[in-house]
Image (tube, grey):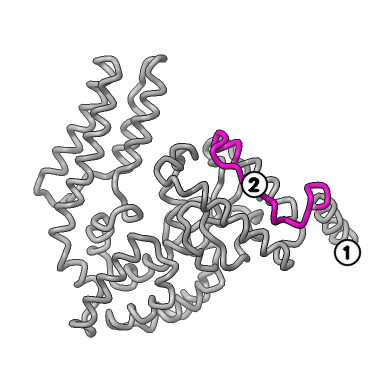
Amino acid sequence: MPSDRIKRITPQNYLKYYYDIPYEGKTSAGKPLRRLKDITCPYRGIKIIPSSTIKKFEKGLSECITAEDCVKLLYGYRNNMLPVEKAIYAIFGDFVRLNPEDNLQNCLMMIRTNCLTRLKLEEMEVLDDVDMLTRKLSAQTALNIRAKTTKCRQIILSNSEQDTFKRKIFLSSLEEVIPKENEKEIFRDIKNKALFLPTSESSRNAFVVKYSKRNQTEIARRLFIASTGSIEHVTPASNGGKNCIGNFLLTSASGNRYRENMPLPDYIKRYPKITQYMQEYIEDVIREIHEGNMTGNETYPYKIKNKLYEESEGRILISLSSYEYSEEEAAKAVEAYENRWNCK
């Protein structure tokens, strides 16, 4: 990577360039969270890679030539990796023992055919689940949805250049279906079930198929970036969620992207340990506040506790027993901080 490109990379634009999280960098309200270190991802439980490491990683990546170089660079981040990325990294580790001078793309190409077959089976299983749910709908609504799943199956089973159907296109096509008033709840379940279609965040097979077409630099970057910090709206912006710290979590980029606009209760069904991870997250944030790293945002634990309880429909109830500030004391600390700045 040219040095001038490295200089343009910032924590604010990194995800926008490389991970397609559209609202990243559009608000400064998340900056206090971005600066934090050693924070547990509230969605996936791994320790988030701090934004401050991005430029260092990119510089190291620009100097990588072989697969062995990339594996050595990624070694320091292996404990931060999510399950899919960790599994791919392990494959690369085995590969470089025999092929140190080769590249990561060739490694993925070697296993691509088998992974593509398994990926198609994963997709079929989700489509089967969707079709099963249509039995609860009226005949016409069910037929409309099954026409779309049938089209997807035809693409999956074909031997064309298009390896699999586009998940986003299928999800968008479901929006064309207009259910009856008494079918809306079931239809919501169907759309949420469709979100389980495999992606490179949730499936090792999907990762291999997708990134076997990418060069070594993109592959290595993808393993790193999935665990970097990302500002997540608890109430999605598309549902009226505000750009304020009381509606923000610091999550891993992968955890953020995979949720999309999925209602939080449904995301918890997908990852039941989220309730546990949220407590670990807030304990890490409290530690940072106690160490003076979020001055002026002492009310954040109370705000995010209430927001998560509301958005999760009571499923997430965070304890703030370790927090040294009462809600009143936190408000006074914020007020004192703002007064100091206003006097300058």
Q: Any magenta on residue 323?
A: yes
Seen as rendered, the residue at the extreme front is 321
For image coordinates 31% across by 70% down, the residue present is 89
Whether the residues at callouts 1 and 2 have beta carbons within 8 Å, the answer is no
Seen as rendered, the residue at the extreme right is 343
Residue topped by disc 1: 344
* Labels 1 and 2: the sequence-earlier one: 2
User: Which numbered marker is on residue 146?
Assistant: none
Give the SS element for disc 2: helix
The image position of residue 229, as x and y in percent, is 52, 61
Q: Nearer the viewer, residue 44 or 62?
A: 44
In the rendered image, the vertical position of residue 103 relative to residue 265, given as above or below: below
Instruction: Kindly report which numbered mark, 1 or 2, lies closer to the viewer in this rendering.
Output: 2
Q: Which residues are magenta?
A: 309-329
Mark 1 residue type: Lys
Left or right side of 13 for 191: left
Mark 2 residue type: Ile
Q: Nearer the viewer, residue 235 or 326?
A: 326
Q: Any magenta on residue 160?
A: no
User: Which numbered marker is on residue 304?
Assistant: 2
Q: Nearer the viewer, residue 267 or 254?
A: 267
In the rendered image, the vertical position of residue 138 relative to residue 287, given as above or below: above
Which image quadrant: the C terminus?
bottom right
